[in-house]
């Protein structure tokens, strides 16, 4: 990737009056990376694997509400992105385990900060939503 392509999401800081621009394309790391981990299930799966490797049915029982199809697809997506490693053991029956890769462990650290912040501010956010909803519905 060329240097100018890497700056697709952020305008160079030479001109302080110009604001950052965000493009709707795959070259933007914000859209490209955050969109994947910011979906409904990815973060929950990543956090479920923090404690170590786990099998499919165990993950499904720990992530309440996820369907088998959605867990399968999200694990494939996370494996494709390099966050999760899938290991097949040649046993009868076949045993498959999922675990975080080094990159997966790395992304969980900043995500934990976000989750902690959300936990600390959850009541405030719900309160703000209620005030807004009451105001717009009147």
Image (cartoon, grey):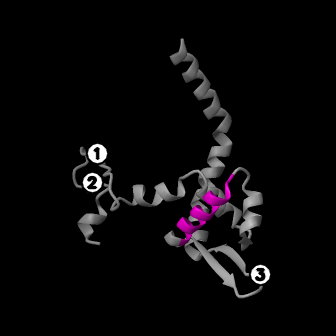
Quadrant for residue 57, please give it.
bottom right
**Disc on the earlier residue, 3 or 2:** 2
Residue 29 percent coordinates (x, y): 39, 60
User: Where's the C terminus, which quadrant?
Assistant: top right
Q: CA distance from mark 3 to mark 1?
A: 57 Å
Relative to 122, residue 90 above or below: below
Residues 50 and 89: in front is 89
Q: Which residue is mark 2?
A: 11
Whether the magenta-drawn stretch holds residue 67 is answered as: yes
Give the quarter of the image for residue 4: bottom left
Q: Which residues are magenta?
A: 66-79
Instruction: Point out the residue furthest to the left here.
Output: 15
Label for residue 19?
1
Q: Residue furthest top?
A: 138
Q: Main secondary structure of the magenta part?
A: helix
Q: Residues within 10 Å of mark 3 (few under 14, many from 20)?
A: few
Q: Nearer the viewer, mark 3 or mark 2?
A: 3
Distance of mark 1 from mark 2, alpha carbons?
7 Å
Contact flag, marks 3 and 1 (Cβ < 8 Å): no
**Going by the image, does 98 lie left or right of 21?**
right
Q: Give the Cα separation between the discs numbered 3 and 2.
A: 54 Å
Residue at left offset 75%, top offset 87%: 91
């Amino acid at each position: 990737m060329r240097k100018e392509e890497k700056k697709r999401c952020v305008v160079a800081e030479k001109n302080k009056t110009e604001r950052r621009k965000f493009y709707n394309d795959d070259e933007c790391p914000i859209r490209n990376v955050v969109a994947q981990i910011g979906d409904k299930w990815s973060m929950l799966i990543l956090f479920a694997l923090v404690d170590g490797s786990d099998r499919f049915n165990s993950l499904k029982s720990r992530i309440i509400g996820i369907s088998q199809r959605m867990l399968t697809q999200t694990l494939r997506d996370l494996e494709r992105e390099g966050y999760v490693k899938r290991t097949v053991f040649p046993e009868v029956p076949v045993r498959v385990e999922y675990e975080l890769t080094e990159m997966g462990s790395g992304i969980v650290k900043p995500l934990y900060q976000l989750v902690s912040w959300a936990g600390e501010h959850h009541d405030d956010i719900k309160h703000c939503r209620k005030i807004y909803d009451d105001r717009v519905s009147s």
